[in-house]
Image (tube, rainbow, N blue to C red):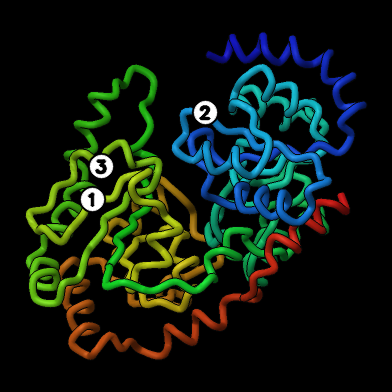
Amino acid sequence: MDIIHIFFYLAALPISFFYKKRHKHLWLFCDLPEEAQDNGYWLFLYVRKNQPEQEAVFAINKSSPDYAKVAQCGRTVAFGSYKHWLLYLSARNVISSQKASGPNACICYILERYRIYRGNKVFLQHGIIKDDISFLYYRFTHIRLFTCSTQQELEFVRQKFGYPYNYVQLLGLCRFDALLEPEKVQKTIVIMPTWRKWLSHPTKGHSSRQLEAEFISSEYYQKWNHLINHPFFEWLSRQYHWEIVFYLHRESQKFAKFFKSQTEGVKIGCFPEYKVPVLLKQSAVMITDYSSVAMDFALLNKPLFYYQFDYAKFREKHLRKGYFDYHRDGFGPVYDEESDLIAGIYNFFHCGLREDTTYSKRRYGFFTLRDQNNCARTYRAIKQL
Protein backbone atom coordinates (compact mmCIF):
# COMPACT_ATOMS: atom_id res chain seq x y z
CA MET A 1 0.00 0.00 0.00
CA ASP A 2 2.85 2.42 0.80
CA ILE A 3 4.30 1.78 -2.68
CA ILE A 4 1.08 3.03 -4.26
CA HIS A 5 1.24 6.15 -2.09
CA ILE A 6 4.85 6.77 -3.08
CA PHE A 7 3.67 6.78 -6.69
CA PHE A 8 0.78 9.13 -5.82
CA TYR A 9 3.18 11.47 -4.01
CA LEU A 10 5.70 11.57 -6.86
CA ALA A 11 2.94 12.08 -9.43
CA ALA A 12 1.20 14.83 -7.44
CA LEU A 13 4.33 16.73 -6.41
CA PRO A 14 5.10 18.55 -9.71
CA ILE A 15 1.41 19.24 -10.36
CA SER A 16 1.04 20.76 -6.89
CA PHE A 17 3.48 23.58 -7.74
CA PHE A 18 1.01 24.83 -10.31
CA TYR A 19 -2.17 23.87 -8.43
CA LYS A 20 -1.24 25.84 -5.32
CA LYS A 21 -0.77 29.02 -7.38
CA ARG A 22 -4.46 28.91 -8.27
CA HIS A 23 -5.53 27.78 -4.79
CA LYS A 24 -3.32 29.89 -2.53
CA HIS A 25 -5.67 29.81 0.45
CA LEU A 26 -6.87 26.20 0.37
CA TRP A 27 -7.67 24.59 3.73
CA LEU A 28 -7.74 20.79 3.86
CA PHE A 29 -9.65 19.17 6.76
CA CYS A 30 -9.98 15.63 8.11
CA ASP A 31 -10.66 13.56 11.19
CA LEU A 32 -10.26 9.84 10.49
CA PRO A 33 -10.61 8.17 7.06
CA GLU A 34 -13.91 6.52 8.07
CA GLU A 35 -15.27 9.14 10.48
CA ALA A 36 -16.26 12.78 10.73
CA GLN A 37 -17.32 13.31 14.33
CA ASP A 38 -14.43 15.16 15.83
CA ASN A 39 -12.96 18.66 15.85
CA GLY A 40 -12.02 18.61 12.16
CA TYR A 41 -15.64 18.08 11.13
CA TRP A 42 -17.03 20.71 13.49
CA LEU A 43 -14.56 23.36 12.33
CA PHE A 44 -15.24 22.46 8.69
CA LEU A 45 -18.97 22.86 9.33
CA TYR A 46 -18.37 26.23 11.02
CA VAL A 47 -16.25 27.48 8.12
CA ARG A 48 -18.79 26.39 5.50
CA LYS A 49 -21.63 28.11 7.39
CA ASN A 50 -19.89 31.27 8.50
CA GLN A 51 -16.99 31.78 6.05
CA PRO A 52 -18.29 30.37 2.75
CA GLU A 53 -15.68 32.32 0.76
CA GLN A 54 -12.92 30.22 2.35
CA GLU A 55 -11.85 27.39 0.05
CA ALA A 56 -12.21 24.26 2.19
CA VAL A 57 -12.14 20.53 1.40
CA PHE A 58 -12.76 17.59 3.76
CA ALA A 59 -10.95 14.28 3.22
CA ILE A 60 -13.06 11.21 3.98
CA ASN A 61 -13.77 7.81 2.46
CA LYS A 62 -16.99 7.58 0.48
CA SER A 63 -17.73 4.33 2.29
CA SER A 64 -17.86 6.16 5.62
CA PRO A 65 -21.25 6.32 7.36
CA ASP A 66 -20.47 10.01 7.91
CA TYR A 67 -19.78 10.78 4.25
CA ALA A 68 -23.27 12.01 3.39
CA LYS A 69 -23.40 14.61 6.16
CA VAL A 70 -19.95 15.93 5.20
CA ALA A 71 -20.86 16.08 1.50
CA GLN A 72 -23.94 18.12 2.39
CA CYS A 73 -21.67 20.69 4.06
CA GLY A 74 -19.17 21.17 1.26
CA ARG A 75 -16.51 19.74 -0.99
CA THR A 76 -14.95 16.35 -0.20
CA VAL A 77 -12.03 14.28 -1.45
CA ALA A 78 -11.51 10.53 -1.10
CA PHE A 79 -9.05 9.88 1.74
CA GLY A 80 -5.75 8.47 0.49
CA SER A 81 -6.52 9.06 -3.19
CA TYR A 82 -4.26 10.77 -5.73
CA LYS A 83 -6.46 13.88 -5.47
CA HIS A 84 -6.01 13.83 -1.71
CA TRP A 85 -2.23 13.86 -2.22
CA LEU A 86 -2.53 16.79 -4.63
CA LEU A 87 -4.58 18.80 -2.15
CA TYR A 88 -2.33 17.85 0.75
CA LEU A 89 0.76 19.11 -1.08
CA SER A 90 -1.04 22.26 -2.26
CA ALA A 91 -2.99 23.32 0.85
CA ARG A 92 -1.91 26.33 2.85
CA ASN A 93 -3.28 24.68 6.00
CA VAL A 94 -3.87 20.99 6.73
CA ILE A 95 -6.28 20.87 9.66
CA SER A 96 -7.13 17.75 11.66
CA SER A 97 -8.04 16.31 15.05
CA GLN A 98 -5.39 13.66 14.38
CA LYS A 99 -1.61 13.99 14.36
CA ALA A 100 -1.48 11.77 11.27
CA SER A 101 -3.45 14.09 9.02
CA GLY A 102 -1.99 13.24 5.60
CA PRO A 103 -3.15 10.71 2.99
CA ASN A 104 -0.62 8.10 4.18
CA ALA A 105 0.60 8.03 7.77
CA CYS A 106 4.03 6.51 7.11
CA ILE A 107 5.08 8.67 4.16
CA CYS A 108 3.60 11.87 5.55
CA TYR A 109 5.40 11.30 8.87
CA ILE A 110 8.72 11.27 7.03
CA LEU A 111 7.79 14.33 4.95
CA GLU A 112 6.69 16.29 8.01
CA ARG A 113 9.35 15.25 10.49
CA TYR A 114 12.21 16.08 8.13
CA ARG A 115 10.57 19.29 6.92
CA ILE A 116 10.17 18.14 3.32
CA TYR A 117 6.50 19.09 3.59
CA ARG A 118 6.22 22.85 4.11
CA GLY A 119 2.51 23.51 4.60
CA ASN A 120 1.01 24.56 7.92
CA LYS A 121 -0.13 21.64 10.07
CA VAL A 122 -2.96 22.59 12.42
CA PHE A 123 -3.61 20.10 15.21
CA LEU A 124 -7.11 20.50 16.66
CA GLN A 125 -6.55 17.59 19.03
CA HIS A 126 -8.66 14.52 19.71
CA GLY A 127 -9.06 15.30 23.42
CA ILE A 128 -7.63 17.41 26.22
CA ILE A 129 -4.07 16.29 26.94
CA LYS A 130 -3.31 15.20 30.49
CA ASP A 131 -0.46 12.69 29.92
CA ASP A 132 3.08 12.88 28.61
CA ILE A 133 2.58 11.97 24.93
CA SER A 134 6.05 11.81 23.43
CA PHE A 135 4.93 11.26 19.82
CA LEU A 136 3.42 14.76 19.91
CA TYR A 137 6.75 16.44 20.69
CA TYR A 138 7.56 19.21 18.24
CA ARG A 139 10.70 17.53 16.90
CA PHE A 140 8.53 14.67 15.62
CA THR A 141 5.59 16.67 14.25
CA HIS A 142 6.54 20.26 13.34
CA ILE A 143 2.93 21.22 13.95
CA ARG A 144 2.42 24.94 13.31
CA LEU A 145 -0.67 25.46 15.46
CA PHE A 146 -1.40 23.22 18.46
CA THR A 147 -4.74 23.95 20.16
CA CYS A 148 -5.27 23.63 23.90
CA SER A 149 -8.40 23.97 26.01
CA THR A 150 -7.28 24.67 29.58
CA GLN A 151 -4.54 26.74 31.17
CA GLN A 152 -2.97 23.68 32.79
CA GLU A 153 -2.86 21.83 29.49
CA LEU A 154 -1.42 24.87 27.71
CA GLU A 155 1.40 25.31 30.21
CA PHE A 156 2.19 21.58 30.21
CA VAL A 157 2.41 21.34 26.40
CA ARG A 158 4.52 24.50 26.15
CA GLN A 159 6.89 23.30 28.85
CA LYS A 160 7.14 19.61 27.93
CA PHE A 161 6.55 19.22 24.20
CA GLY A 162 9.14 21.68 22.87
CA TYR A 163 6.99 23.91 20.63
CA PRO A 164 7.80 27.55 19.91
CA TYR A 165 5.75 29.62 22.36
CA ASN A 166 3.10 31.02 20.01
CA TYR A 167 2.62 27.69 18.20
CA VAL A 168 0.53 26.50 21.18
CA GLN A 169 -2.63 28.51 21.81
CA LEU A 170 -5.59 28.43 24.19
CA LEU A 171 -8.49 28.02 21.75
CA GLY A 172 -10.70 25.15 22.98
CA LEU A 173 -11.90 21.99 21.25
CA CYS A 174 -14.14 22.79 18.30
CA ARG A 175 -16.55 19.96 19.16
CA PHE A 176 -17.33 21.63 22.50
CA ASP A 177 -19.52 24.17 20.67
CA ALA A 178 -21.99 21.41 19.80
CA LEU A 179 -21.43 19.46 23.01
CA LEU A 180 -22.70 22.39 25.09
CA GLU A 181 -25.96 22.64 23.17
CA PRO A 182 -28.82 21.59 25.51
CA GLU A 183 -30.15 18.05 25.15
CA LYS A 184 -32.36 15.89 27.33
CA VAL A 185 -30.37 13.58 29.58
CA GLN A 186 -31.61 9.99 29.71
CA LYS A 187 -31.34 7.26 32.35
CA THR A 188 -28.16 5.90 30.83
CA ILE A 189 -24.79 4.90 32.26
CA VAL A 190 -22.11 4.95 29.58
CA ILE A 191 -19.03 2.78 30.18
CA MET A 192 -16.15 3.99 27.99
CA PRO A 193 -12.71 2.48 28.64
CA THR A 194 -9.78 3.56 26.52
CA TRP A 195 -7.55 1.17 24.58
CA ARG A 196 -4.23 -0.50 25.37
CA LYS A 197 -1.29 -0.37 22.97
CA TRP A 198 -0.13 -3.84 23.88
CA LEU A 199 -3.48 -5.37 22.94
CA SER A 200 -4.52 -3.55 19.77
CA HIS A 201 -1.90 -3.78 17.03
CA PRO A 202 -0.28 -6.92 15.59
CA THR A 203 3.52 -6.94 15.64
CA LYS A 204 5.82 -8.59 13.11
CA GLY A 205 5.04 -12.31 12.88
CA HIS A 206 1.92 -11.83 14.97
CA SER A 207 -1.38 -12.72 13.28
CA SER A 208 -4.77 -11.13 13.92
CA ARG A 209 -5.98 -14.46 15.31
CA GLN A 210 -3.14 -14.46 17.83
CA LEU A 211 -3.99 -10.89 18.74
CA GLU A 212 -7.61 -11.84 19.39
CA ALA A 213 -6.57 -14.82 21.50
CA GLU A 214 -4.28 -12.63 23.59
CA PHE A 215 -7.05 -10.06 23.97
CA ILE A 216 -9.57 -12.62 25.24
CA SER A 217 -7.06 -13.92 27.79
CA SER A 218 -6.07 -10.39 28.90
CA GLU A 219 -6.91 -8.79 32.22
CA TYR A 220 -8.47 -5.92 30.26
CA TYR A 221 -11.06 -8.17 28.62
CA GLN A 222 -11.71 -10.25 31.74
CA LYS A 223 -12.25 -7.23 33.97
CA TRP A 224 -14.52 -5.24 31.68
CA ASN A 225 -16.57 -8.23 30.54
CA HIS A 226 -17.06 -9.26 34.16
CA LEU A 227 -18.15 -5.73 35.07
CA ILE A 228 -20.89 -5.50 32.43
CA ASN A 229 -22.28 -8.81 33.75
CA HIS A 230 -22.41 -7.65 37.36
CA PRO A 231 -25.81 -8.25 39.06
CA PHE A 232 -25.95 -4.58 40.09
CA PHE A 233 -26.59 -3.52 36.51
CA GLU A 234 -29.32 -6.12 36.12
CA TRP A 235 -30.97 -4.77 39.28
CA LEU A 236 -30.62 -1.20 38.05
CA SER A 237 -32.08 -2.11 34.68
CA ARG A 238 -34.99 -4.19 35.95
CA GLN A 239 -35.98 -2.13 38.97
CA TYR A 240 -35.32 1.40 37.77
CA HIS A 241 -35.19 1.02 33.96
CA TRP A 242 -31.68 2.36 33.52
CA GLU A 243 -29.78 1.45 30.37
CA ILE A 244 -26.06 0.70 30.40
CA VAL A 245 -24.07 1.22 27.19
CA PHE A 246 -20.59 -0.29 26.95
CA TYR A 247 -18.66 1.52 24.22
CA LEU A 248 -15.05 0.68 23.38
CA HIS A 249 -12.45 3.12 22.09
CA ARG A 250 -12.18 3.09 18.29
CA GLU A 251 -8.82 1.24 18.53
CA SER A 252 -10.60 -1.55 20.43
CA GLN A 253 -13.91 -1.60 18.52
CA LYS A 254 -12.70 -4.63 16.57
CA PHE A 255 -12.91 -6.61 19.83
CA ALA A 256 -16.49 -5.57 20.63
CA LYS A 257 -17.80 -8.90 19.30
CA PHE A 258 -16.21 -10.71 22.25
CA PHE A 259 -18.10 -8.76 24.92
CA LYS A 260 -21.38 -10.28 26.04
CA SER A 261 -23.79 -9.40 28.81
CA GLN A 262 -26.61 -11.55 30.18
CA THR A 263 -28.47 -8.41 31.25
CA GLU A 264 -31.02 -7.11 28.75
CA GLY A 265 -30.39 -3.53 29.83
CA VAL A 266 -26.68 -3.67 28.98
CA LYS A 267 -25.93 -2.80 25.36
CA ILE A 268 -22.61 -3.30 23.58
CA GLY A 269 -22.27 -0.06 21.63
CA CYS A 270 -20.60 -0.12 18.21
CA PHE A 271 -19.98 2.60 15.64
CA PRO A 272 -21.92 3.80 13.67
CA GLU A 273 -25.06 2.66 15.54
CA TYR A 274 -23.78 4.51 18.60
CA LYS A 275 -21.83 7.75 18.27
CA VAL A 276 -19.68 9.26 20.98
CA PRO A 277 -21.08 12.85 20.91
CA VAL A 278 -24.64 11.56 21.30
CA LEU A 279 -23.68 9.16 24.10
CA LEU A 280 -21.94 11.96 26.00
CA LYS A 281 -24.87 14.34 25.75
CA GLN A 282 -27.61 11.83 26.53
CA SER A 283 -25.93 9.81 29.29
CA ALA A 284 -26.32 10.74 32.96
CA VAL A 285 -23.34 8.86 34.43
CA MET A 286 -20.00 7.67 33.08
CA ILE A 287 -17.58 4.90 34.05
CA THR A 288 -14.15 5.11 32.43
CA ASP A 289 -10.52 4.32 33.18
CA TYR A 290 -8.05 6.82 31.70
CA SER A 291 -9.92 8.05 28.63
CA SER A 292 -9.77 11.76 27.85
CA VAL A 293 -13.46 11.50 27.00
CA ALA A 294 -13.95 12.04 30.74
CA MET A 295 -12.93 15.65 30.08
CA ASP A 296 -15.89 16.11 27.72
CA PHE A 297 -18.22 14.58 30.29
CA ALA A 298 -16.78 16.79 33.01
CA LEU A 299 -17.40 19.88 30.88
CA LEU A 300 -21.09 18.93 31.00
CA ASN A 301 -20.73 18.71 34.82
CA LYS A 302 -21.97 15.13 34.95
CA PRO A 303 -20.83 12.58 37.56
CA LEU A 304 -18.30 9.92 36.61
CA PHE A 305 -16.34 7.05 38.14
CA TYR A 306 -12.81 5.85 37.34
CA TYR A 307 -12.06 2.11 37.26
CA GLN A 308 -8.27 1.67 37.07
CA PHE A 309 -7.35 -1.97 37.76
CA ASP A 310 -4.11 -1.84 35.72
CA TYR A 311 -2.70 1.61 36.52
CA ALA A 312 0.98 0.60 36.84
CA LYS A 313 0.92 -1.39 33.59
CA PHE A 314 -0.90 1.42 31.77
CA ARG A 315 1.79 3.89 32.80
CA GLU A 316 4.57 1.52 31.84
CA LYS A 317 3.25 0.40 28.46
CA HIS A 318 0.74 2.98 27.23
CA LEU A 319 1.19 6.58 28.42
CA ARG A 320 3.45 8.21 30.96
CA LYS A 321 1.93 10.40 33.64
CA GLY A 322 1.62 14.09 32.90
CA TYR A 323 0.33 16.93 35.07
CA PHE A 324 -3.03 15.29 35.89
CA ASP A 325 -3.31 13.11 39.00
CA TYR A 326 -6.55 11.15 39.18
CA HIS A 327 -6.75 11.11 42.97
CA ARG A 328 -5.83 14.78 43.33
CA ASP A 329 -7.45 16.23 40.20
CA GLY A 330 -9.99 13.62 39.04
CA PHE A 331 -13.64 14.47 38.38
CA GLY A 332 -14.94 11.47 40.31
CA PRO A 333 -13.82 8.73 42.72
CA VAL A 334 -11.06 6.34 41.64
CA TYR A 335 -11.29 2.58 42.18
CA ASP A 336 -8.97 -0.31 41.35
CA GLU A 337 -11.28 -3.10 42.57
CA GLU A 338 -14.62 -3.97 41.01
CA SER A 339 -16.30 -4.51 44.38
CA ASP A 340 -15.33 -1.01 45.53
CA LEU A 341 -16.50 0.50 42.24
CA ILE A 342 -19.90 -1.17 42.48
CA ALA A 343 -20.23 -0.13 46.13
CA GLY A 344 -19.42 3.46 45.18
CA ILE A 345 -21.96 3.52 42.37
CA TYR A 346 -24.59 1.86 44.57
CA ASN A 347 -24.06 4.48 47.25
CA PHE A 348 -24.35 7.21 44.62
CA PHE A 349 -27.75 5.88 43.51
CA HIS A 350 -28.85 5.19 47.09
CA CYS A 351 -28.19 8.86 47.92
CA GLY A 352 -30.38 10.10 45.08
CA LEU A 353 -27.60 10.62 42.53
CA ARG A 354 -25.77 12.98 44.85
CA GLU A 355 -21.98 13.06 44.82
CA ASP A 356 -19.24 14.62 46.89
CA THR A 357 -19.15 18.34 46.03
CA THR A 358 -15.36 18.06 45.70
CA TYR A 359 -15.78 16.64 42.21
CA SER A 360 -18.16 19.29 40.89
CA LYS A 361 -15.80 21.98 42.20
CA ARG A 362 -12.91 20.33 40.38
CA ARG A 363 -14.92 20.16 37.16
CA TYR A 364 -15.80 23.85 37.28
CA GLY A 365 -12.29 24.87 38.27
CA PHE A 366 -10.53 22.87 35.57
CA PHE A 367 -11.94 24.49 32.44
CA THR A 368 -10.50 27.86 31.46
CA LEU A 369 -12.95 28.15 28.56
CA ARG A 370 -16.60 27.20 28.96
CA ASP A 371 -18.39 28.70 25.98
CA GLN A 372 -19.46 27.99 22.41
CA ASN A 373 -16.85 30.16 20.68
CA ASN A 374 -14.22 27.47 20.18
CA CYS A 375 -14.65 27.23 16.40
CA ALA A 376 -14.61 31.01 16.02
CA ARG A 377 -11.39 31.35 18.04
CA THR A 378 -9.73 28.54 16.13
CA TYR A 379 -10.76 29.95 12.75
CA ARG A 380 -9.27 33.35 13.61
CA ALA A 381 -6.04 31.76 14.82
CA ILE A 382 -5.63 29.78 11.59
CA LYS A 383 -6.33 32.88 9.47
CA GLN A 384 -3.41 34.62 11.20
CA LEU A 385 -0.86 31.92 10.29
Which residue occupies 74% across, 10% down? 11
Residue at the front extreme of this rendering: 72
State how far apart marks 2 and 3 are (Cα): 24 Å
| Residue 85 position in % (x across, y down) | 70, 22
Taking the image as shown, residue 108 lies to the left or right of residue 301, namely: right
Mark 2 or mark 3: name the one nearer the start of the chain. 2
Mark 3 or mark 1: name the one nearer the start of the chain. 3
Taking the image as shown, residue 176 lies to the left or right of residue 385, namely: left
Residue 98 visible from this viewpoint: yes
Which residue occupies 48% across, 35% down? 34
Amino acid type for the residue under numbered disc 3: Ala
356 lies above or below 169: below
The quadrant holding residue 174 is bottom right
111 lies above or below 372: above
Task: Determine which of the numbered discs, if any, sits on residue 62 in the image.
Answer: 2
Q: SS of the residue at dot 1?
A: strand
Q: SS of the residue at dot 3?
A: helix
Amino acid type for the residue under numbered disc 2: Lys
Mark 2 or mark 1: name the one nearer the start of the chain. 2
Q: What residue does disc 1 label? A: 268
| Residue 161 position in % (x across, y down) | 68, 52
| Residue 168 position in % (x across, y down) | 75, 57
| Few, some or many residues within 10 Å of mark 3 (<14, 14–19, 20+) | some
The quadrant holding residue 198 is top left
Closer to us: mark 2 or mark 3?
2
Callout 3 touching callout 1 (CB < 8 Å): yes
Task: Determine which of the numbered discs, if any, sits on residue 256 in the image.
Answer: 3
Considering depth in this image, is 27 or 351 the residue closer to the camera? 27
